[in-house]
Amino acid sequence: MMSRALPYLALGAMGAGWGATIPLTKVAVSTGHQQFGLIFWQLVIGAIVLGTIQLLRRRPFVVTARSIGLFALIALVGTILPNFASYTAAMNLPATLLAILIATVPMFAFPIAILWGSDRFDWRRAFGLAVGIIAVVILVAPDTTLPDRTKVWFVPIALIAPFFYGIEGNYISRFGTLHHGPIQTLFGACLVGMVMTGPIAVVSGHWFVPWNNFGAPEWAMIGSGTLHGLSYATYVWLVARSGAVFASQVAYAVTGFGVLWAILFLNEAQSPYLWGALICMMVGMSLVAPRKGTIDVDAD
């Protein structure tokens, strides 16, 4: 019985962990920490968490020139650019809204896959894309969803992150990750990303040293980076155990828990429109999600 329940428990734990990173991001930017400084330290935390897992797994980690190129690309498309957008949006938008907008990843991934020729047009999934767009419109149209209507222009910025995640997923699906498994790929991306963002953080004035004035934002940054690394490792385990299609259902849990944590811990005011948008987004995700057998992920 426990063996059967374990994948579902893991799915819930991942959703709770990844969902918690959304309000934690809101806390991390609350006292003025800037984007590249936050991205650098998040990459440091990710490297520590994933590097520890890599050591425990004792898998050979052979790095070539092509590996460095792969890590740089994944760091740029999977972390630096989307996180810059996410931190910028988090400075101006409620966490509940961010939690729903991050669920648009499959909405972007589907048309990108069609453009790249790695997927075919499907009316069911096209309808799901339309429902997802309706959810975004519901979020930004009413006056009650955003406390400050001048912030509506940050919604497209928030959508930059899922757009790049859609690109990243399609790239990995089409070209693979060379001889590296997901843990090694993300670990390498963290290391290369640190080299890329460290100098930018210093030159741009975004650099900060967390332990000089340690408080809630710094704890939030550490918590977010740790939860992301552990959740990702759990995702890889779940893909190997139960398949990529089952594991992909974590997207629903991430959105649901992201909204829940934002309400509980940030005490954000809600409106009926937000719940309508959440329902539409969940329906859209269920329609856009690939059917069983259409996802192939190497979980080594």
Image: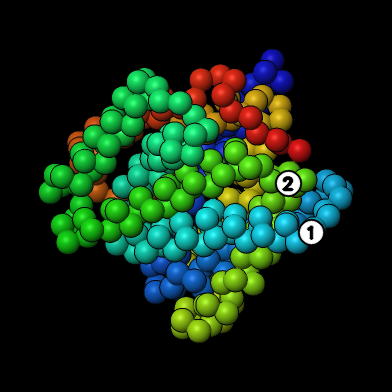
Helix, strand or loop status at disc 1: loop
- On the picture, is 62 further left or further right than 167? right
Q: Residue at x 63, y 42 (%)?
A: 175
Residue 64: give its label.
1
Q: What colouring does the structure picture have? A: rainbow
- On the picture, is 130 further left or further right than 49? left
- Vertical relation: 138 (above or below) 219: above
Q: CA distance from mark 2 to mark 1?
A: 10 Å
Residue 178: give its label.
2
Q: Residue at x 59, y 28 (%)?
A: 295
Helix, strand or loop status at disc 2: loop
Q: Is residue 42 visible?
A: yes
- Split into 4 quadrants, where in the image is the C terminus? top right
Q: Amino acid at mark 1?
A: Thr
- Vertical relation: 35 (above or below) 135: below
Q: Position of residue 167 (x, y in %)?
A: 49, 46
Q: Quadrant of residue 187?
A: bottom right
Q: Residue furthest left?
A: 143
Q: Amino acid at mark 2?
A: Leu
Q: Residue at x 61, y 65 (%)?
A: 193
Q: Quadrant of residue 103?
A: top left
- Vertical relation: 141 (above or below) 147: above
Q: Position of residue 215 (x, y in %)?
A: 50, 71
Dots 2, 1 in contact, CB < 8 A:
yes
- On the picture, is 52 further left or further right than 214? right
